[in-house]
């Protein structure tokens, strides 16, 4: 009888270990997927926040969770970048102005060479639809740079 108890215990442990292994694997996969889901939005690949830069400033823009398409493309999940110099995000649904401090990348560009006067500046990346209507602050990112001569 004692031999049977050990075998049953061994069988139970084996089943528990297999079940726990599957559960841990599922948990690990879910945790790995979470950062990807949480990473929706726009960001600067370059320059880094707080960077000391000189002219010309190489700006690299990226988006996660949507696809970059030229202005005029009105498909869900698409849009293009806008760079706002020394300003903040544009409210959702508002058309982004076209002036010296609001640079439009209607061709679907993701890189830009920028020159700014020396000093501290903010750069805000704003994603918008094909009609230049902002996707709002959730689809923006702001960094600070210090331009040196």
Image (cartoon, grey):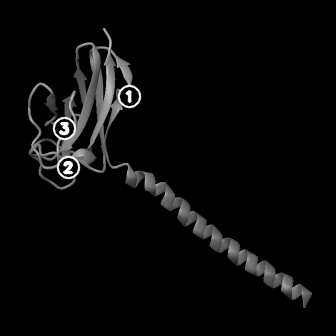
SS at circle 3 = loop
Q: Mark 1 vs mark 3: which is more N-terminal?
A: 1
Within 10 Å of the Cα at label 1, are there few (<14), some (14-19), or many (20+) other Cα atoms?
A: some
Q: Is residue 97 above or below residue 72?
A: above
Foreground residue among 41 and 14: 41
- From the viewer's perspective, tell me whether residue 35 is left or right of residue 28: left
Q: Residue at x 27, y 23 (%)?
A: 121
Cα gap from disc 2 to disc 1, whole angstroms: 25 Å
Compared with residue 52, is residue 61 higher up or lower down, i.e. above or below? below
Q: Residue furthest top?
A: 149
Q: Secondary structure at mark 1?
A: loop
**Where does label 1 land, which residue?**
48
Residue 33: image tag: none
- Image quadrant in which you'd find residue 3: bottom right
The part of the image, by quadrant, that contains residue 104 is: top left
Disc 2 is placed on an element classified as strand
From the image, state whether disc 1 or disc 3 is nearer to you.
1
How much space separates mark 3 and mark 2, taking CA atoms? 10 Å
> Is 145 or 12 nearer to us in this picture?
145
Q: Is residue 145 above or below residue 4?
A: above
Task: Give the residue displayed 12% in from the left and 39% down from the top.
Answer: 96
Expressed as whole percent of the image width and height from the top left, the position of residue 123 reads: 26, 29
Q: Which residue is mark 3?
A: 108
Residue of label 2: 78
Residue 5 location, x and y as percent? 85, 86
């Amino acid at each position: 009888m004692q031999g049977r108890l050990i075998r049953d215990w061994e069988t139970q442990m084996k089943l528990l270990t297999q079940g726990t292994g599957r559960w841990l694997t599922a948990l690990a996969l879910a945790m790995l997927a979470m950062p990807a889901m949480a990473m929706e939005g726009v960001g600067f690949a370059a320059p880094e926040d707080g960077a000391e830069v000189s002219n010309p400033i190489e700006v690299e823009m990226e988006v996660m969770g949507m696809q970059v398409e030229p202005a005029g493309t009105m498909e869900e999940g698409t849009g293009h970048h806008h760079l706002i110099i020394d300003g903040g995000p544009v409210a959702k649904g508002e058309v982004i102005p076209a002036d010296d401090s609001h640079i439009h990348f209607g061709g679907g560009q993701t890189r830009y060479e920028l020159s700014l006067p020396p000093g501290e500046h903010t750069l805000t990346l704003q994603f918008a639809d094909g009609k230049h209507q902002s996707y709002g602050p959730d689809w923006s990112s702001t960094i600070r740079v210090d331009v040196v001569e």
